Amino acid sequence: MLYKISNSSKINTEQAWNNFVLSGKVEESYVRNVIAESWLRCHNAGVNYLDGYCQDLLSREEIQIFIQEKKQLIDIAKPIMKTLFKCVEGSSFVVVLVNEKGLILETIGDSDVLMMTKTLNFLPGANWSEECVGTNAIGTTLVINNPIQVSGAEHYCSKHHIWTCSAAPIHDSYGNVIGCLDMSCLIGREHSKDLGMVVAAVRAIENQLHKEETQGRLFAAHKHLTTVLSTISEGIMSIDKDSFITHANPALAKIVGMLPSDIIGKKVSSILGDCYHIKKVLETGRSCLEEEVTIDVLKQQIHCTLEAIPIKDQSMQVVGAVITFREIKQVHQIVNKMAGTQARFGFRDIVGKSHKIQEIIRKAKVAAKSLSTVLLLGESGTGKEVFAQAIHNSSERKDAPFIAVNCAAMPRELIQSELFGYCDGAFTGAKRGGRPGKFELADGGTLLLDEIGDMPLDMQVNLLRVLQEKNVIRVGGDKPIPIDVRVIAATNKNLSLEIEKGAFRKDLFYRLNVVTLTMPSLKERYGDVKLFVEYFLQRMSLKLGKEIAEVHPQVMEILNNYHWPGNVRELENVLEYAINMMEGNTITKESLPFYLNKEEMKIEEEDELFTLAELEGNAIKKALKKFDGNITKVAQSLGIARNTLYEKMKKYKIKK
Ligand SMILES: Nc1ncnc2c1ncn2[C@@H]1O[C@H](COP(=O)(O)OP(=O)(O)OP(=O)(O)O)[C@@H](O)[C@H]1O
């Protein structure tokens, strides 16, 4: 609503004003309601109608601060105020920008009028609210939140009766009043168009303000989005419907080895080569999820999983797509973690205090820090894989994949493609886009080639080539793919014997035999059986949700004396059997597998055939095992002095 005045009412208004200031009563037929209400507000607020000089003026410093607070509004309004002023220049006008409280921010005017307004303190920093200076276009427009023209005696203070002022409130995009624009001049001119001009100028200010606010919000949203995208480890890009890249996050830039700014604006095919899946998404508008692809980037092949989601407009037309890439090594790290095949053992988890195992741990720790290939030898079940994991986990590669391959368990015809991967269409049944092999999957990490002694001879040649060249060529392909993998090979076979038999290549043996660790068998590890019993029983009780089982001393004796051909794995199996068979909470002789009891009987029977010297030697060995090599305890249990014990150990060549 616009509150305009009509010329015919001027004389009556003056009379009505006189009557109002004398009697406090409004002659409603001569005064517009909006003015009458304002007069009453001013009267109630105790405004002096004889005054009109603004007393409420900010100091210079305060003006600077509050102008700074409204900088955006001033910057937007100023050019529009200038345009408005140009329309009335030379006609004694002043155009004024005011904040939401009535404080003047900016004035532009003819010099004669500016001089006059100065005498009223109509200046930046002055408060022109109704409460301060009575009814006036500025103060009243802010109260009624509508454009208004106030002329002559409609002003509450007599000093303003020579003025005609038109003002309109300025709103932000939420509809809040953030200020107003006023145009004032001396009474007696044609003023009918003033208010319309002010309203038009205010609309222009509001439009510009809303545009900047929207831009600000868009910018903030964009910033938010790019920050989120930059923290995501997958490579993400968006393309338009013509396959031009519109956005690329830093992870994608890293995958393709370019700067994000060099990628944006390029055709996707110029960066990633032709990609069937992306084309299909743009053509059909259907998403493509988790496709394994090989992309050619800077003469290198990168293996990724690709996900492409179409972007559609309101009429469901495809206008682009968002494409996510995850490098296969990253994918497999996740898959490995989920499948539980990641290296979980560290040196700290390795059970064993015996001298032999401690010596191997020491050597393995040194090997972990080097880049060399490691060859792990030892009987089955001695912990070769456990050591391979611990080496990986204490090497610099610990955050990269650990992949274990059992060379004996793989079908002969598949070994090649399992290890080195294959290309699209390499053979019937080959997966579209090809597949990376274990070497590629372990890139940056460690590959355990378990049971290497069982690898077919023809494969041994290929393996040797890969180890020497440090690249793999996929089955059906011809491009070498560089790999950075630490190989740990393990076997329970005697490789020298295999070489003699012609079943293992000498050159491969020399290539693998850089750092060799020979795992001791369990029977060589004095004292460790007891530790393994405690370790496995605790783990199994937790797994089965049972109380930790007690072990009868007789059982401990049997376990200590057994020769453990299956080593740690066999001991683990025996304890699992026993824990399932035990009655109550104690593992007794009866809980053990039958063959262990038979073994005990065998030892007893065989004992009868021993000479006295052998018996003495056996007794010492048994006691050393039982008391983990503690000489004092062994001597006490055998009823001899420590010196005698040392003499006898020397005589029978028994080591601690
Ligand atoms: N020092 C150890 N600490 C804890 N557990 C061990 C240790 N050594 C071996 N084990 C356990 O014993 C079992 C056999 O170990 P592992 O598979 O490493 O032996 P291996 O020598 O690689 O056997 P194979 O030659 O048959 O492959 C596993 O269940 C492993 O958890």
Image: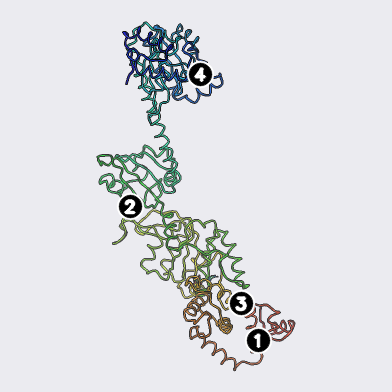
- Left or right of 211: which side holds 445? right
- Real-space Cα separation, disc 2 to disc 4, in angstroms: 63 Å
Q: Which mark is residue 526?
A: 3
Q: Which mark is residue 145?
A: none
Kindly state the secondary structure of the residue where label 4 is placed: loop
- The spot of residue 614 in percent (x, y) is 64, 89
Which of the marked residues, 3 or 2, is nearer the chain's N terminus?
2
Tell me the residue that label 1 is attached to: 617
Kindly state the secondary structure of the residue where label 3 is placed: loop
- The spot of residue 482 in percent (x, y) is 44, 54
- Viewer-closest of 582 and 51: 51
- Real-space Cα separation, disc 3 to disc 2, in angstroms: 56 Å
- State the residue at coordinates (41%, 22%): 142
Between tags 1 and 3, which lies in front?
Answer: 3
Color style of the picture: rainbow
Which of the marked residues, 2 or 4, is nearer the chain's N terminus?
4
Q: Quadrant of the C terminus?
A: bottom right
Between tags 3 and 4, which lies in front?
Answer: 4
- Left or right of 50: which side holds 37? left
- Real-space Cα separation, disc 1 to disc 3, in angstroms: 16 Å
- The spot of residue 502 in percent (x, y) is 46, 73
Tell me the residue that label 2 is attached to: 289
Q: Quadrant of the N terminus?
A: top left
- The spot of residue 260 in percent (x, y) is 42, 40
Q: Are the residues tagged 3 and 2 within 8 Å (C-beta)?
A: no
- The three-letter amino acid code for the residue at tag 3 is Tyr
Kindly state the secondary structure of the residue where label 1 is placed: helix
- The three-letter amino acid code for the residue at tag 1 is Gly
- Real-space Cα separation, disc 3 to disc 4, in angstroms: 93 Å
In the image, residue 51 above or below residue 599: above
